Image (tube, rainbow, N blue to C red):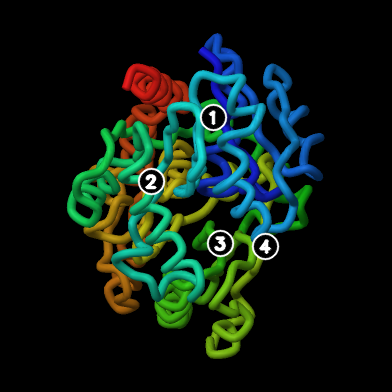
């Protein structure tokens, strides 16, 4: 099978959807798939290094606007598309002119349900893109059952859907904490401070405003407790402005984007990983925390609660009082309960692997070719 995977929208720092595309790119060649990675013209070196078994087609313009126009009208009918059996567009959009069966990944439907969580220009654009892909793609990939249900409800009469949940690297995100202290010291982080840990892009839907309000109350009751925030700046939320409103801002550390080596240690060593997002398509930080055996606090009635399946503590999204109370429950857990929760979370995380996700993608590709 010959597959073209469009990686041109993947930013240099991998998170969420970017991590998904990168893991797919790295693993497809090992499944006897002749893989062509379609990249931006200035973005070839990292893909050669990341997926040495793939061919590289560096044909996409660098600027975002030009990239989207090129994808819509030229990319799907070009020489690269003509050399493969199936085209995979992994981020909602797809070529309008195409010569090959096409698979499109739908991550979430928040552009429909909560457009205020996105930059103003993006919501209408991606609503149109998703509606077009739903009607014209040969197969859709959904990253969760939760998103697949929303797709049925919000975009009826769509192409066949294959659910391919995201995965986690179970060797990197593991229970073994023997090197955590050394890693923390190497990054000049204290190893003896109890902290809550948040991981995610700084943007409105992640619920950081709720978390900081909850932390302000918790900090008054827990004089040693800190909040550590890891994630790159996004849009619409100024972390500095939120911190300016906190009475205990001196006990909040923004770590910015953290490297792959340090992240598992930060998850394991925390008193709780708190991910109070208002809504996601999957919520990969929750799965990574579970694989590390961390105590997780996340939002009820969301895809994250489905992924956790009883192994996380839940609070209603957007409610700082309830979030604070739930975090306090996590802080009060005894060592026996924490250890039992760690084992349960790890067992649940082991249901989600990148290899199983790739297998579902291969199913989607075969369905598209046969359609």
The secondary structure type at the circle numbered 4 is: strand
Label 4 vs 3, first from the N-terminus: 3
Label 1 vs 4, first from the N-terminus: 1
- The one of 302 and 210 positioned closer to us in this rendering: 302
Where residue 30 sits, quadrant-wise, is top right
- The one of 39 and 267 positioned closer to us in this rendering: 39
The secondary structure type at the circle numbered 2 is: helix
Relative to 34, 141 lies left or right: left
Q: Mark 4 Cα within 10 Å, few/some/many (few <14, many 20+)?
A: few
Dot 1 corresponds to which residue? Answer: 24
Q: Mark 1 Cα within 10 Å, few/some/many (few <14, many 20+)?
A: many
Dot 4 corresponds to which residue? Answer: 255
Dot 3 corresponds to which residue? Answer: 201
The secondary structure type at the circle numbered 3 is: loop
- The one of 70 and 223 positioned closer to us in this rendering: 70
Query: In the rendering, at what x and y percent does residue 120 appear?
Result: 48, 76
Q: Nearer the viewer, mark 4 or mark 2?
A: 2
Q: How far apart are marks 4 and 3 (CA)?
A: 12 Å
Q: How far apart are marks 2 and 1 (CA)?
A: 20 Å
Q: Mark 2 Cα within 10 Å, few/some/many (few <14, many 20+)?
A: many
Q: Can residue 91 be seen in this view?
A: yes
């Amino acid at each position: 099978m010959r597959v073209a995977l469009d990686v041109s929208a993947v930013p240099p720092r991998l998170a969420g959807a970017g991590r998904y595309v990168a893991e797919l790119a790295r693993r497809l060649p090992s499944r006897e798939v002749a893989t062509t990675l379609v990249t931006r013209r200035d973005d070839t070196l990292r893909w050669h290094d990341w997926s040495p078994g793939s061919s590289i087609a560096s044909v996409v313009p660098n600027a975002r606007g030009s990239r989207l126009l090129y994808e819509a009208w030229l990319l799907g009918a070009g020489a690269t598309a003509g050399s493969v059996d199936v085209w995979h567009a992994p981020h909602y959009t797809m070529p309008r002119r195409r010569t090959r069966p096409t698979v499109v990944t739908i991550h979430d439907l928040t552009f429909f349900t909560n457009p205020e969580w996105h930059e103003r220009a993006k919501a209408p654009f991606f609503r149109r893109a998703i509606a077009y892909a739903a009607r014209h793609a040969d197969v859709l990939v959904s990253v969760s059952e939760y998103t697949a249900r929303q797709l049925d409800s919000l975009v009826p009469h769509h192409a066949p859907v294959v659910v391919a949940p995201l995965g986690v690297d179970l060797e990197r995100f593991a229970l073994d904490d023997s090197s955590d202290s050394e890693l923390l010291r190497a990054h000049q982080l204290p190893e003896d401070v109890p902290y809550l840990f948040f991981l995610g892009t700084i943007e409105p839907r992640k619920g950081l405003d709720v978390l900081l309000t909850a932390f302000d109350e918790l900090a008054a009751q827990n004089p040693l407790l800190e909040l550590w925030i890891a994630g790159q700046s996004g849009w619409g939320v100024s972390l500095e402005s939120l911190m300016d409103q906190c009475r205990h801002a001196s006990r909040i550390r923004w770590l910015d984007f953290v490297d792959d080596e340090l992240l598992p240690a930060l998850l394991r060593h925390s008193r709780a990983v708190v991910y109070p997002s208002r809504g996601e398509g999957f919520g990969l930080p929750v799965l990574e925390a579970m694989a590390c055996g961390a105590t997780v606090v996340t939002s009820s009635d969301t895809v994250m609660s489905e992924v956790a399946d009883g192994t996380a503590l839940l609070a209603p999204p957007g409610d700082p009082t309830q979030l604070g109370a739930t975090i306090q429950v996590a802080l009060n857990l005894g060592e026996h309960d924490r250890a039992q929760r760690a084992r349960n979370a790890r067992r649940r995380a082991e249901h989600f692997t990148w290899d199983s996700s790739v297998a579902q993608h291969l199913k989607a590709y075969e369905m598209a070719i046969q359609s």
